[in-house]
Amino acid sequence: MAQKNLKLSSPDKQLEVVIDLADNISWNVTLKGSNIIDNAVISMDMGEGRILGNAPKLRNQSMVSKNEVFIPVVANKDAKINNEYNQLTLDFKNNYQLIFRAYNDGIAYRFIDGNRKTRLVLNEEMTLFFPDGTSSFFPEEESFYSHNERDYLVKNVADMQKGAFCSLPVMFNTKTAKVLFTEASLINYPGMFLAKTMDHAMTSTFPKYVLKAIPNEAFSPDRNQIIEEEADYIAKINGKRAYPWRVFIISDDDRTFVESNLVALLSDKSKITDTSWIKPGQVAWDWYNANNVYGVDFEAGINMDTYKYFIDFASKNGIEYVILDEGWTKSTTEIMDDNENMDVPELIKYAKSKNVGIILWVLWKPLYENPEEILKLYSSWGAVGIKVDFMQRSDQYVVESYEKIAEIAAKYKMLVDYHGAFKPAGVERMWPNIINYEGVRGNENNKWTNAITPEHNVTLPFIRMAAGPLDFTPGAMINMNQLDYETGGPNYAPLFTRPMSYGTRAHQVAMYTIFEAPLQMLCESPTIYYKEQETVDFITQIPTVWDETVVLEGAVSDYIVLARRKGDNWYLGAMTDWTARDFEIDLSFLEKGNYTLQGYQDGVNASRNAQDYKIIKQDVDQNTKLKLKLSSGGGYSAIITKN
């Protein structure tokens, strides 16, 4: 077929992709006629001179439109997702395909290689050219060896240093719309990063295939490694396969990035047939608060009495799980035995008698050396899940381990929470027992830094959360304002064993509605929670999975107001940065009928004392207009129950 431009539009005709087949494959995207991505050049180097996309010869093309309903096993934001798109499939000589999809909220593409003899991927190119004036919320990395817990630095693309690179997801802000870039169906293949090249251009970059990694003897060698030897390729391949989707959420409305389900829609189907045992829920968590319980007649620490105290707290408050974080094992590498102060099988029996499940923390490296035997043992004790930590890598070997660990865990009906992890990118849809990911700079950082600001917190829903759930670990009860109201001085100090959080109490509580986390932590010490029972009673009414999500107001890094439905009840959450804000919220999303609203709001004196809050009750219906008054660093939550 003759070389030509090919066009693909979204179902609502607002987005258009134009694909140019000449010396290479390139494309651009417009939204409502305005350029969003000026030019993108894509290819895959499979070695031995075979480059998919080089001098492409189109054999045939086909177009299909779909409009169906997708039902996720774990509903992060919606129990039913409308999957509507137009798809263009391009078949090329040299035995490969390129598929483009256009949705109303973005576009995606993937390569499919049909060559059974393919053994290596040397590189995958994706170079994006953005219009003049494009800036980025840039999660800049210093190394591929990373937890991917970054700040979102606002930078002009043209001003970035050449070679500066970031993890995904990353957001770009053009003059007319924003683009969030991430990936889906990341299976047995390295994670992509983006690096600055020319003035307005970013290009893909990947960790190479690791040939040799050794313990870092200078810095916690049980968990930290030095990559000593790498190959000159990024992936080993066994014949024909589909490669990850490259996903672009595109909108001139910031709310779209919170509501979008593109990563879920572009991920593979569940490999678990019976998923009835996968139960989301809340978790009493020990590590943030350093097991710091007091006012008790036993010595607090990693011991049976302390964990029974956690279990009793969870049981009394209907909290489904307790995590035993670092310290319960004989050592961090001897993970099939508990320490001298613990009898974990006995503790799990005690927890079961209280209707609480136990999740066990474990380092990735010793776990992956013997996952079958270790998970079989933990399952025999009665553990219901694992929290796997310190992967810190995105190369092919580690990406594949996410799937293999989840598969073995599923065999024993165990949940998986990945920490020290890259962002969600689809394996959690194949193995929905992967119920949460970190890959976020969350509350635990309060132990050593003041970086977790309200501005950071209202950036996350629009960028990191667009990729999937995030284990931010909310629930801090020691809350601080930006400045002391008397002196104007700083009102915050990082304390490792007694951490505090920036922003108001209502800001922390709103995270339970706003931050998607099917396994949602309560990070504070149970001793403090007992003193704040009214707040605990509010938090424990909030679900961790949802039937429907509607974003009412939103601006990246400034504020967010959203409503989520579970059954007949609705839940509101609102958060702002350091700017105090007022909102008038229309409740027309409610069905007809009468409702009772239980609200948790900033107190009158929250600007003087961030822990000041007020719980209110009022009758509402779909004609009600709520007036919200958020303090600096403030928040608001509501539970709206149908009468």
Image (tube, helix red, strand yellow):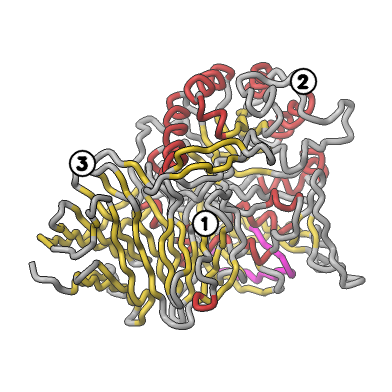
Q: Tell me whether the residue at label 1 lies in contact with that at label 3, contact meaning CB atoms closer than 8 angstroms.
A: no
Q: Which residue is mark 1?
A: 465
Which residue does the image show at 36% across and 82% down from the upper left? 34
Q: Which residue is mark 2?
A: 341
Residue 626: say if magenta.
Answer: yes
Q: Residues within 10 Å of mark 3 (few under 14, many from 20)?
A: few
Helix, strand or loop at disc 2? loop
- Give how far across and how far down residue 38 sits, in percent: 35, 77
Q: Is residue 104 left or right of residue 475?
A: left
Amino acid under disc 2: Asn
Report the residue that reaches farthest toward the right: 486
Looking at the rendered image, the disc whose residue lies closer to the viewer, 2 or 3, is 3
Q: Is residue 334 left or right of residue 157?
A: right
Report the residue that reaches farthest toward the left: 1
Amino acid under disc 3: Lys
Q: How many marks?
A: 3
The segment highlighted magenta reads: 621-637
Q: Which residue is mark 3?
A: 117
- Give how far across and how far down residue 417 sits, in percent: 55, 39
Looking at the rendered image, the disc whose residue lies closer to the viewer, 1 or 3, is 3
